[in-house]
């Protein structure tokens, strides 16, 4: 996961595997000033072998669920799993809503533009 502050250009990288407590991502986000609107880019979950697919999918869903708890994080792209970046966008006035349709946990994220 890449977190990026487009104003200060400050960037953080986080690697998540099956041993990672995704609640620790809150600590990464906390390294930015409070209220900072962050852009997130997700890449990974590529191990699609029979033994590892469930672990990869669980990692993806845990990260997405944790990011949903942080209203200042805007997921800009997600090239994850075996589907690549499958992101749908709905435009309504000034609000853009993105949701991921290829994962077990439906997730809706309100972007901040």
Image: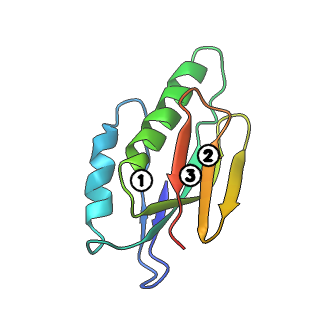
Q: CA distance from mark 1 to mark 2?
A: 22 Å
Q: Residue at x 53, y 30 (%)?
A: 105
Q: Position of residue 86 (x, y in %)?
A: 72, 44
Vertical order, 98 against 49 (above or below): below
Work out which quarter of the rendered image holds the C terminus and state it. bottom right
Tag 1 residue: 14
Q: Secondary structure at mark 1?
A: loop
Horizontal side of residue 72 vs 87, given as left or right: left
> Can residue 91 be seen from the camera position used here?
yes
Disc 3 crowd rating (10 Å Cα; few below 14, some 14-19, many 20+) is some
Circle on res. 42:
3
Instruction: Single out the residue that lies furthest toward the front.
Output: 93
Q: Position of residue 49 (x, y in %)?
A: 66, 20
> Can residue 85 be seen from the camera position used here?
no
Between discs 3 and 1, the one toward the N terminus? 1
Q: Nearer the viewer, mark 1 or mark 2?
A: 2
Tag 2 residue: 99
Q: Nearer the viewer, mark 3 or mark 1?
A: 3
Q: CA distance from mark 3 to mark 2?
A: 14 Å
Instruction: Single out the residue that lies furthest toward the top.
Output: 51
Q: Position of residue 72 (x, y in %)?
A: 39, 64
Disc 1 crowd rating (10 Å Cα; few below 14, some 14-19, many 20+) is few
Instruction: Looking at the picture, tell me which residue is in the foreground, 15 or 91.
Output: 91
* Quadrant in which residue 20 is drawn: top left
Q: Secondary structure at mark 3?
A: strand
Q: Secondary structure at mark 2?
A: strand
């Amino acid at each position: 996961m890449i977190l990026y502050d487009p104003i200060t250009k400050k960037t953080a990288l986080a690697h998540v595997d099956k041993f990672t407590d995704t609640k620790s991502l809150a600590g990464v986000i906390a390294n930015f000033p409070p209220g900072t609107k962050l852009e997130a880019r997700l890449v990974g979950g590529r191990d699609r072998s029979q033994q590892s697919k469930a672990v990869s999918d669980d990692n993806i869903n845990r990260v997405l669920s944790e990011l949903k708890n942080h209203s200042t994080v805007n997921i800009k792209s997600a090239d994850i799993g075996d589907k690549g970046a499958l992101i749908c966008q709905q435009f309504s006035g000034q609000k853009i809503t993105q949701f991921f349709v290829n994962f077990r946990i439906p997730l809706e994220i309100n972007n901040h533009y």
